[in-house]
Image (spheres, rainbow, N blue to C red):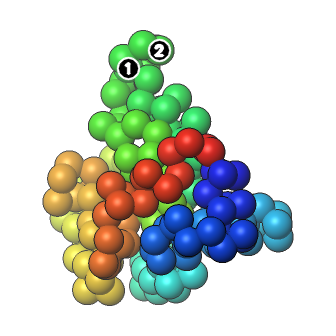
Amino acid sequence: MFKALFEALLGTNRLNSNAFMIAKHIASIVLQEKKGLVEKLYPDFKIKAEQIQQKFPEITIISTLRTFKMQDDLYAQGRTTPGTIVTAAKGGQSYHNYCLAFDFYFTDTHWDSPRARWEKVGVYAESLGCVWGGRFGDLGHVEWHPTFTWQELYPHFKDGN
Ligand SMILES: [Zn+2]
C-alpha cells in the first residue's frame, strides 16, 4: 500500500477523500506499529466493534485488517491451494483490506452455533450502522462503509500494495 500512502502524505490530490482517510489510517498503523486486531480498525468503526464486544462479551474478534497479499492467499484456498473455499473476495475486494471489517466467533463454540445466536450480534451491529455478513452467508463477519464502496477505494490502492 505504500504508493497510496506516499501519495496521501505528499498531498498529490490523486486520492479521493475516503481513500485519503483510509491511507492515513493505514499509515498510522504502520508508523505507530499498532499490533492489536481491534486497534487496527478504522477509528469510527473501531468504536462500533468495541460496543459490539461490550454488549456480547462471549464473542472473540479473530480477524481485522488483511493485506492484499493475505487476501489473495485466502482467495486461493480451496481453488489453487488446499483447504475449503472461505472467501469470494480477491486482494482489494474485501473491506478487510481497508480496516473496515472484522470477523468474530463465539469463544465457547467457535463456528458451531445456531444462526439465531449469530443473528443477535448481527442485528445489533446493523443498529450501529454496520453491515452484517449473515445477510450474504458470512455469519461471523461485520463491515462498515456508510458512504462508499471498496470499488471506489480499490483504484487508489491496487498498484502499491
Ligand atoms: Zn470477514
> In what quadrant of the picture does the C terminus appear?
top right
> How many numbered circles are shown?
2
Q: Is residue 50 visible?
A: no
In percent of width and height, residue 134 lies at 22, 58
Task: Tell which residue pokes out farthest to the right in this image.
Answer: 32
The local secondary structure at tag 1 comes to loop
Q: Which mark is residue 78?
A: 1
The residue at 42%/30% (across/down) is: 75
Considering only vertical position in the picture, is 149 above or below 83? below
Tell me which amino acid carries mark 2.
Thr
- The crowding category of the residue bearing disc 2, from other C-alpha atoms within 10 Å (few below 14, some 14 to 19, many at least 20), is few
Q: Is residue 150 visible?
A: yes
- The crowding category of the residue bearing disc 1, from other C-alpha atoms within 10 Å (few below 14, some 14 to 19, many at least 20), is few
The local secondary structure at tag 2 comes to loop
Q: Nearer the viewer, residue 128 or 20?
A: 20
Tell me the quarter of the picture where residue 25 sits. Answer: bottom right
In percent of width and height, residue 42 lies at 55, 74
The residue at 35%/61% (across/down) is: 152
Q: Which mark is residue 81?
A: 2
Q: CA distance from mark 1 to mark 2?
A: 6 Å
Residue 137 in the figure: left or right of residue 111: left
Tell me which amino acid carries mark 1.
Gly
The residue at 66%/52% (across/down) is: 3
In percent of width and height, residue 4 lies at 61, 57
Q: Which mark is residue 90?
A: none
In percent of width and height, residue 45 lies at 48, 78
Residue 141 in the figure: left or right of residue 72: left
Tell me the quarter of the picture where residue 101 sits. Answer: bottom left
Q: Are marks 1 and 2 in contact (CB under 8 Å)?
A: yes
Residue 34 in the figure: left or right of residue 136: right
